[in-house]
Image: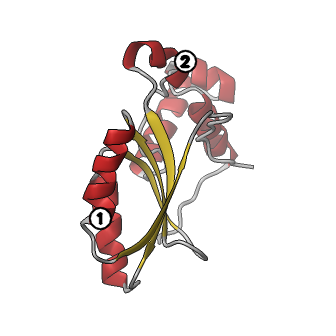
Amino acid sequence: MEQIDIDTIDLRLLDALQRDASLSNQDLAAQVHVSPPTCLRRVKRLRELGLIERQIAILSTDRLTPILGHGLTAVVEISLERQSAELLADFEQRAVADEAVQQCYRVTPGPDFVLIVQVHDMPGYQALAQRLFTQNANVRNVRAFFSVKRAKFAPGVRLA
């Protein structure tokens, strides 16, 4: 992996953006204490370097529940029968391609993968299980934990 040079101004920009990506360039520049043209140039560079993957809106599941229904969030541990590089990569590729999978982690020790999945209801989870787990002969064990409450969701990266 190539060495990326960033300084404290870049870190302050990244920190401010991950807290509120909707800031205007003027407001972001003022918050970080740089000129607006400098701010714009640096943010563009941070994007080009791949340090800013994308900007998204984080939706309130609590506020959307009355509109869309409750939905079902599960934390799922998957252990594979065989863990060759090819088989791990194959399962990972299938998992990340599935729209119900919000997060996919390859972990050790213990299970091989931990997935965070969001489905509409239990039949939706059963369909996901059929697609990713049951049809894959290399999946040895699946443990699912269903969320009853999200107490914290903080996707930011600690920069200090």
Relative vertical location of residue 26 with respect to residue 152 in this rendering, above or below: above
Residue at horizontal 41 percent and vertical 83 percent from the top:
83
Q: In this figure, which residue is indicated by the disc labeled 1?
A: 134
Counting from the top left corner in percent of width and height, residue 85 is at 36, 83
Counting from the top left corner in percent of width and height, residue 112 is at 49, 72
Say which of 82 and 92 sits in front: 82
Q: Secondary structure at mark 2?
A: helix
Counting from the top left corner in percent of width and height, residue 80 is at 41, 76
- Mark earlier in primary sequence (1, 2): 2
Q: Secondary structure at mark 1?
A: helix
Relative vertical location of residue 145 with respect to residue 26 in this rendering, above or below: below
Say which of 72 and 83 sits in front: 72
Q: In this figure, which residue is indicated by the disc labeled 2?
A: 26
Between disc 1 and disc 2, the foreground one is: 1
Q: Is residue 156 left or right of residue 132?
A: right
Residue at horizontal 40 percent and vertical 13 percent from the top:
67
Residue at horizontal 43 percent and vertical 39 percent from the top:
44
